[in-house]
Image: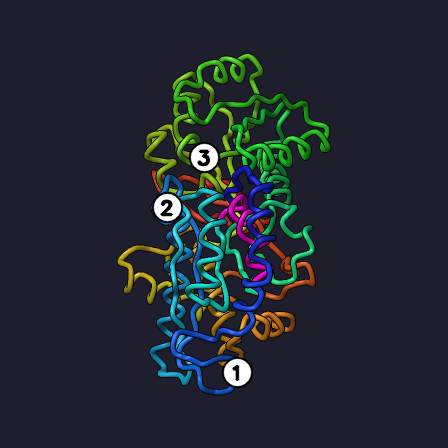
């Protein structure tokens, strides 16, 4: 989820300069109170969490961080021989900040694993450094398709890609409305363009005439786009972007008389989309995500336990990527339980790790991608988000 434009030139230069030192640090440290390795002397190991914790998109990163913290606290409460400490790294959504924090995590803090980076741009910036330091990373939310094409051996993803997501929501809209015309809108950021491409290509592949426009995320006036959409008169609209702009865009479309079914991806899956558009204008909006948000009462005992414990600890319901953060942390818990307290040994453990998580079944292929993924559909109903089901099964409420 939430890719940003990566600036790889300087990042790779920094990574190359640090190669020798970081590789040594990543493979030998085993925690804050330990002399090293899997000798049995470790009492605490450190796992990092990297993402936008105070920046403009933090509402989508804090939930997976909370999920991870909950998993580690539950584990530590069992009084294990080796405890786990979560070390947060706040990137504020900035790639260069992620690149600067990665060597600190390895050399100074001596983490043996990383949950994150949360965004794809940050992943492009920090993961080459984590790779050199032999630090296994599990991103709960980065969705850029090319992340798995770098040949990284210590990188893993907890969700489906933007390509899969854009196609999934487009197919859902086609099934729901049998549209004669479609319209795709995206911003300038890499995430917006990428997921917009996926939806646009799927509409075209299904023979649906589709027009497209791009907005400037820095603007607050989208009237020119509204005019173009009204002239096109589509039956469905897909917006590739974030809730901060998506809410304003949706409001202006509705105020301009556009009534077509409006859908977006995980970048817009937050209650702030509703507040930004207004409850009336947001009603019926569809949001897709490769994540599962457990709304309402849960019948599955494991999922119910997670929801109850999350609400008890944070006094809020689980939100976007909460379950993925929890499942990522549980993978590290399983590795440490099995006696693995170095980055290299944890990474080896992940090669055969298989679990039925609260979010989905988890088993990684050699390239770090999940063996199976799902797109979930949500709808704004009476001013609140509701889960409709998996994209190939869901039906609209309105």
Horizontal side of 192 relative to 371 (left or right) equals left
Q: Residue at x 40, y 42 (%)?
A: 57
Boundaries of the magenta span: 119-133
Q: Residue at x 51, y 36 (%)?
A: 264
Q: Is residue 120 visible?
A: yes
Q: Which residue corresponds to mark 3?
A: 285
* Dominant secondary structure, magenta: helix
Q: Could you say whether the residue bearing mark 1 is in a helix, strand or loop?
A: loop
**How many neighbours does mark 1 have within 10 angstroms: few (below 14), some (14-19), or many (20 or more)?**
some
Cα–Cα gap, marks 3 and 2: 19 Å
Q: Which residue corresponds to mark 2?
A: 59
Residue 312 placed where, x, y %?
28, 64
- Let me know if residue 325 is in the magenta part: no
Residue 260 placed where, x, y %?
51, 25
Q: Which residue corresponds to mark 1?
A: 38
Decide which of 354, 237 is in the foreground and name it: 354
Indicate which disc, 3 or 1, sits on the residue closer to the N terminus.
Answer: 1
């Amino acid at each position: 989820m939430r890719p940003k434009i990566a600036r790889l030139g300087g990042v790779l230069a920094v990574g190359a300069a640090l190669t020798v030192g970081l590789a040594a640090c990543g493979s030998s440290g085993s925690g804050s109170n330990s002399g090293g390795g899997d000798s049995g002397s470790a009492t605490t190991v450190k796992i990092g969490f990297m993402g936008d914790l105070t920046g403009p998109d933090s509402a989508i990163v804090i939930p997976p961080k909370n999920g991870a913290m909950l998993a580690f606290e539950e584990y530590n409460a069992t009084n294990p021989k080796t405890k786990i400490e979560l070390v947060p790294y706040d990137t504020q959504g900035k790639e260069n900040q992620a690149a600067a924090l990665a060597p600190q995590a390895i050399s100074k803090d001596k983490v043996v694993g990383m949950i994150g980076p949360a965004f794809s741009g940050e992943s492009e910036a920090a993961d080459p450094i984590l790779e050199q330091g032999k630090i296994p990373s599990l991103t709960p939310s980065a969705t850029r398709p090319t992340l798995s094409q770098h040949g990284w051996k210590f990188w893993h993803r907890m969700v489906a890609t933007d390509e899969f997501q854009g196609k999934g929501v487009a197919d859902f809209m086609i099934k729901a409305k049998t549209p004669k015309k479609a319209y795709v809108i995206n911003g300038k950021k890499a995430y917006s363009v990428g997921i917009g491409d996926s939806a646009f290509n799927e509409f075209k592949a299904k023979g649906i005439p589709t027009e497209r426009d791009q907005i400037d995320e820095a603007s607050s006036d989208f009237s020119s786009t509204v005019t173009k959409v009204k002239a096109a008169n589509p039956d469905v609209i897909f917006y590739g972007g974030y809730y901060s702009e998506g809410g304003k865009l949706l409001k202006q479309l509705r105020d301009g008389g556009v009534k077509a079914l409006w859908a977006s991806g995980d970048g817009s899956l937050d209650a702030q989309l509703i507040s930004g558009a207004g409850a009336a204008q947001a009603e019926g909006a569809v949001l897709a995500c490769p994540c599962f948000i457990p709304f309402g009462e849960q019948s599955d005992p494991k999922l119910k336990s997670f929801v109850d414990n999350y609400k008890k600890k944070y006094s809020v319901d689980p939100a976007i990527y909460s379950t993925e953060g929890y499942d990522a942390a549980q993978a590290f818990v399983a590795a440490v339980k099995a006696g693995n307290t170095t980055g290299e040994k944890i990474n080896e453990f992940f090669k055969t790790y298989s679990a039925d998580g609260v979010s989905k079944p988890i088993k990684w292929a050699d390239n770090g991608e999940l063996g199976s993924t799902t797109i979930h559909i949500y709808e704004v109903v009476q001013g609140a988000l509701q889960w409709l089901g998996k994209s190939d099964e869901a039906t609209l409420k309105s």
